[in-house]
Image (cartoon, rainbow, N blue to C red):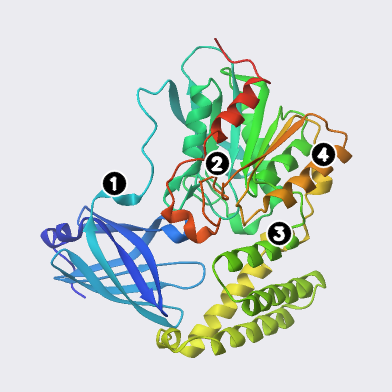
Amino acid sequence: MAGASIAGQSVVDGTWSGAIEIMGEKFDFTVHFKTDGGNIHGTMDVPIQGATGLPLKEILLDGSKISFKLETPQAVAAFTGIIEGGKISGEFEQAGMAGTFALTRSEEKTKSEPDKPKEPLPYEEEEVTFRNGDIKFAGTLMLPKKQGRHPAVIMITGSGPQNRYEELFGWKVFQGIADHFTRNGIAVLLYDDRGMGGSGGNVFDVTTEDFATDALAALGYLQSRGDINPREIGLCGHSEGGIVAPFAAAKSSEVAFIICISGTGVPGKDILLKQTELIARANGEPEEKIRESVNNIETIISLINESRGEEEIKKKIGEIVEIQIAAMTEEQKKGVKDLEEFRKGMVDELHKQFAGPWFQFFLKLDPAPILEKVKCPVLLTFGELDLQVPAEWSKEAMVKALERGGNKNFQARIFPKANHLYQAAKTGSPSEYTGLPKEFVPGFLEFMSGWILERVNVVK
């Protein structure tokens, strides 16, 4: 394909929003193009996956024709389209599936994130780095402007690759929490997960316990600074971060306190099965299909726990995929361009998920014995409608574990109508996240900051 002229490239520069239609379903996405030095650069946001800034490859523009690719852990997604009348429309292919896509030019601010913190900011933001062994981490330190040694909180993201703001479904969840804390005199360190943003390493090659050593490396960095009180540094983790924080506190008495936002004291395999059931039911799936999904996961977990060979696990995954393909509607089957490639792609994706070190560690992880070793003050928060970490179940397990360990310095609260992200929800299903206001339920931020302020000395 011929190279594009600078003038031609300027036609595509900007933000384009729309959707992919494939196998009877529709998925929203946004792309951003920018010409620099005669080359087009681009990124993609996929709200339903909580993914932003995914780099596009092989962007080619020839007159009104454009093509680009997105590399994913599962398979390359290829887009080929035509630019016409402020729209880009065309075909989409990935792992044997074929569909269509359509985009229209939109304003940059339609990326669906809440307003930035109100200015003037009563704090400074400093780009920082620290190391955990051979891995370099990049982050932002939000520091109150008053001179002195400040108490601090280190934010720990949930599962999967996350940037420092835990940007999910177009919402920088940690930005709002950090802004609130720092306005109340508490410094905050946010850092990119391994392999994300400016941090090195790979989040898929390690386990929850490794993430705890990352958090402790961040703590060591803050302790080395003259503007941070080394005895008043706590950890605040969300979801898996709510397991990482106790892991770190159990390893080091230097952790002054921990906040677990939707953490759990329930074994990983039990959480996985329960959230599969609850989310499917909230999404209106038939009970028969729900039981089938749970049974399939149980079977794979059993094979992993019995340390069966890779071939046996892959064979079982293949049988599950065959059942799923047989259950596809005619509309869904139309979206399959190459059945064999589609089947292989599904098997490889599921096998990669279940066979990875993080997942195998998580399945066998029981957070309760770890919580029993935590001696510092602990704050537990839960969302009443959280389907990923069921509130009452998780709260009971964590409270009992702390009590067994003799820790009486803890507090727990369930926020009414809150989902896993602490938005005011209707059902709690993740499918609602993108359509709900990107704001926390009333009192959530104040509850956390008030608890911290009772335990630290803010610079006056």
Q: Name the residue under label 2.
A: 137
Q: Mark 3 points at which residue?
A: 271
> Looking at the image, which residue is at 70% across and 66% down?
273
Q: Earlier in the sequence, mark 2 or mark 4?
A: 2
Q: Earlier in the sequence, mark 1 or mark 4?
A: 1
Residue 283 in the image: state x and y as whole percent: 54, 67
Q: Distance between the residues labelled 2 and 3?
A: 30 Å
- Number of numbered labels in the structure image: 4
Q: Distance between the residues labelled 2 and 1?
A: 29 Å
Along the line of sight, the residue nearer the viewer: 110 or 315: 110
- Which of the image's four quarters has the N terminus? bottom left
Q: How far apart are marks 1 and 4 (CA)?
A: 45 Å
The amino acid marked with disc number 3 is Ile
Count neighbours of disc 3 (C-alpha within 10 A) and say few if under 14, some if 14 to 19, many if 20 or more. Answer: many
> Looking at the image, which residue is at 59% across and 54% down?
203
The amino acid marked with disc number 2 is Phe
Q: Picture quarter containing residue 19?
A: bottom left
Q: Which of marks 2 and 1 is nearer the N terminus?
A: 1
Q: Do the residues labelled 2 and 4 touch (CB within 8 Å)?
A: no
Q: Distance between the residues labelled 3 and 4?
A: 19 Å
> Looking at the image, which residue is at 53% across and 27% down?
181
The amino acid marked with disc number 1 is Lys
Q: Picture quarter containing residue 313?
A: bottom right
Q: Name the residue under label 4.
A: 402
- Judge left or right: residue 76 versus residue 371: left
Along the line of sight, the residue nearer the viewer: 248 or 180: 180
Query: Closer to the camera: disc 2 or disc 1?
Result: 1
The amino acid marked with disc number 4 is Leu
